[in-house]
Amino acid sequence: MALIPIRHLPQLLSFRTRQNLALLCGAIGLILAGNAVYGAGMPIWGGTLMFLGSIAVPVGLKWWDDFSQWGMPALVLSGLLLLQGFHFLEHTVQMVQYYLLNLPSAQSQGLISALNVEWVHFTWNVIILACSVYLLRRGMGGFWGWAMVIWTTAHTLEHLYLFVRYLEISRELSALGLPAYGVAQVLPGILGRDGWLAESGICGRIPGLTTLPRVAIHFGWNLGETLLLVVAAQLNLMRLIPREMEKTHD
C-alpha cells in the first residue's frame, strides 16, 4: 500500500477506500438495531451492541489500513479518537436522559447500560491513560499533550476512588444479603454533589465541583478529555506520523 502524507485529523479518521463498506454495514446495523429495539422490544443496549457489531469489520479494516500506511502511533491515535468519541456520545446521551427526559440518575445509563459498572469504567480509563502516555512518548507532547495526560490521569484517579468505594459498599451489601446492582450509577466520587470534596468541607461550597450530580461531573470529565485529545492530536500529528513513515522507507 502506497504511503500517503497525512496533515489533518479528518484524513486519519476517514474510512478512505472502506467508505462504501462502512456505509453499507452502518445502514444494515441501524435497520437491524431499530427493528430489534422498537419491533421486538430489545433493550437499547442490545440494539447498540448489534449496531457496533455490524460496523466492527469496516472499522477493523480501517485500523489495519492506518497501521499499514502510517504505523502504530497512527493506529493508536485513530482507535483512541473513535473510541473516546463514542464514549463521549454515551455521556451525552446520559445528559439528555437526566436533564431533558427527567430520568433519575439510576436510569440515565446511556446507550450501553449493561456496561455501566465501576470495574468497566475504571478499566476503560486505565486503557485511555495508557494510550495517552504512549502517544505522549511518541511525539504528541507540548502543552496540549501534557494537559491531556494530566487531565486523563485525574479522571482515572476519580474512577479509582469510585472503584474502591464500590468494592467497599458491595461487601457491606453482600454481608446484609442485598444485591449491589445499581450502586455504580449513583455512587458519588471525589467531585460533585455528595462527593468526597463536598463532604470533607476542605474548600467549602464550590458551584459545580461540589454541587453537580454524577452524570454532569462525568460528562465534564469526558468533554475535557475529548477536546484536549483532539487539539493535542491535530497540533502534533506530523510529529507522530513521520517517524513511522521514515522507518517504513528504510
Image: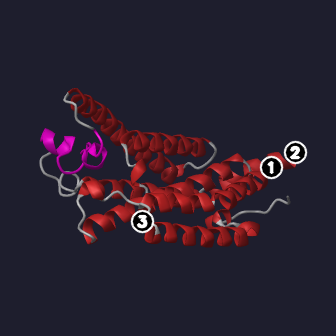
- For residue 246, the mark is 1
Residue bearing the label numbered 2: 250
In-image side of 143 versus 214 (left or right) = right
Alpha-carbon span between mark 3 and mark 1: 53 Å
- Circles 1 and 2, Cβ within 8 Å, touching? The answer is yes
Instruction: Give yes or no for residue 115 being in the magenta stretch.
Output: no
Identify the residue shown where x is 43% and y is 56%.
112
Residue 10, position in %: x, y? Answer: 63, 68
**Residue 44 seen in the current view:** yes
Q: Main secondary structure of the magenta part?
A: loop
Q: Which callout, 2 or 3, points at the residue further toward the start of the chain? A: 3
Quadrant of the image containing the C terminus: top right
Residue 202, position in %: x, y? Answer: 15, 40
Specify start and end residues of the magenta stretch as a single range: 180-202
In-image side of 150 versus 52 (left or right) = left
The crowd level at tag 2 (other Cα within 10 Å; few <14, some 14-19, many 20+) is: few
Instruction: Give yes or no for residue 195 being in the magenta stretch.
Output: yes
